[in-house]
Amino acid sequence: MNDQAALLRQKMMQKSLKQTVQAFEQAKTLAVVSGKGGVGKTNISVNLAIGLAKLNKKVLLFDMDIGMGNIYHLINGDASLSIVDFFERNRSIDQLVQTGPGGISYIHGGSAFSELFEWKQEYKEKWMAALETLSTEYDFLLFDMGAGANAASLNILEAADEVLAVTTPEPTAMTDAYSMLKFIYMRDHEKSFYLICNRAESAKEGRETANRLKRTMETFLNVTPVFLGSLPEDACVRKAVKMGSPFTLSFPKTKVSLSFEQIVQAYAGVPEKKTEHGPRFMDKLRRFFTERGDAE
Ligand SMILES: Nc1ncnc2c1ncn2[C@@H]1O[C@H](COP(=O)(O)OP(=O)(O)OP(=O)(O)O)[C@@H](O)[C@H]1O
Ligand SMILES: [Mg+2]
């Protein structure tokens, strides 16, 4: 009897240890967002993924931009396989993972996400299972979101551990970024928020832009985002886009690439936010599809 009790206790301990390890083995999930479109999310997502890969992190970049599916343009990638193939053509999620430059992996989103709200239960379960597998295989799942929040991106916006908002110094970009951040914060008060100011005329303008957004968030939402840095307007970004090669790889010594290096350092240097249950991405995703339902 005693032996049995000891065995049971041992099994329970092993189980709880396994759960703890699993919780901490989940990838960090980061959604890159903006209010206004065209402010540089895709360029920043791709180069951030590359920067983290340089730090020996395993990064999977997910193209959630259902309209354009931008990432493959920027890396001369292959758009013939997309998440649609996973849902409708029985491809495994691993078959969809493609290799990008600088040691990153990426998945092309395609247009399936736009029909998220018509997803069958079977699709939702497949999606959750796929993300669960991916989150144990990678250190980072980085989601390049389309501009604004749409029904399709809601599950990721709500579940992601972290949100990186990109803005430019233009007032409309800033107010739209704030609306987006508020929208996300209202759904999850525990997220970590980061800011990048892109296309700034000077570091000072970038800092001031971020500070204004930061103060607004502190005043009205009572949350403090981390400003990661700003990027200058630089013609090499456009050139790199045309070449289909990310600017930090094709023009590593330019001002914008050097600034980007600092952004990566700043992001990597932020201490891990300790939450009681470790990363909560999968729990939140599950809740999104089950408890609360998917209708908004
Ligand atoms: N720092 C910069 N300097 C010069 N041009 C830039 C810079 N950042 C972005 N651009 C230009 O803006 C274009 C749009 O960038 P990007 O595709 O990354 O934006 P986005 O926010 O992902 O757009 P969308 O909302 O359509 O997804 C780029 O193709 C490039 O021409
Ligand atoms: Mg984009």
Image (cartoon, helix red, strand yellow):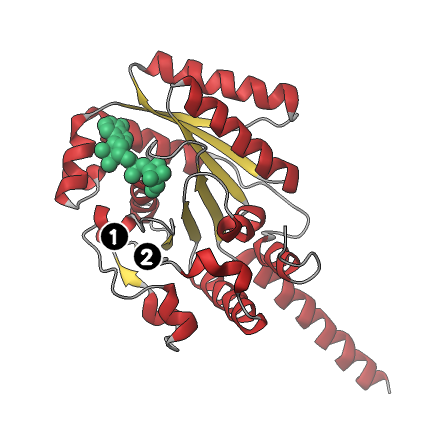
Give the residue displayed 42% in from the left and 35% down from the top: 267
Residue depicted at x 53% and y 46%: 157
- Residue 204: x percent and y percent? 36, 12
Mark 2 is on which residue type? Tyr
- The quarter of the rendered structure image containing the N terminus is bottom right
Q: Amino acid at mark 1?
A: Tyr
Mark closer to the chain start, 1 or 2: 1
151 or 6: nearer the viewer: 151
Residue hosting label 1: 72
Image position, residue 130 (x, y; %): 48, 67
- Identified at 62% across, 67% down, the residue is 18
Assign ligand 1 to one image quadrant. top left
Mark 2 burial class by Cα count in 10 Å: few <14, some 14-19, many 20+? many
Looking at the image, can residue 220 be seen? yes
User: 78 left or right of 262?
Assistant: left
How far from the left and from the top, in percent, is residue 93?
40, 69
Residue situated in front as seen by the camera: 275 or 243: 243
Quadrant in which residue 295 is drawn: bottom right
Q: Residue at x 38, y 58 (%)?
A: 111
Kindly indicate the quadrant of the structure image that contains residue 183: top right
* Observer able to see residue 188: no
Q: Secondary structure at mark 2?
A: strand
Question: In the image, which disc is placed on residue 106?
Answer: 2
User: In screen coordinates, is 15 left or right of 128?
Assistant: right
| Percent of width and height locating residue 120 | 55, 70
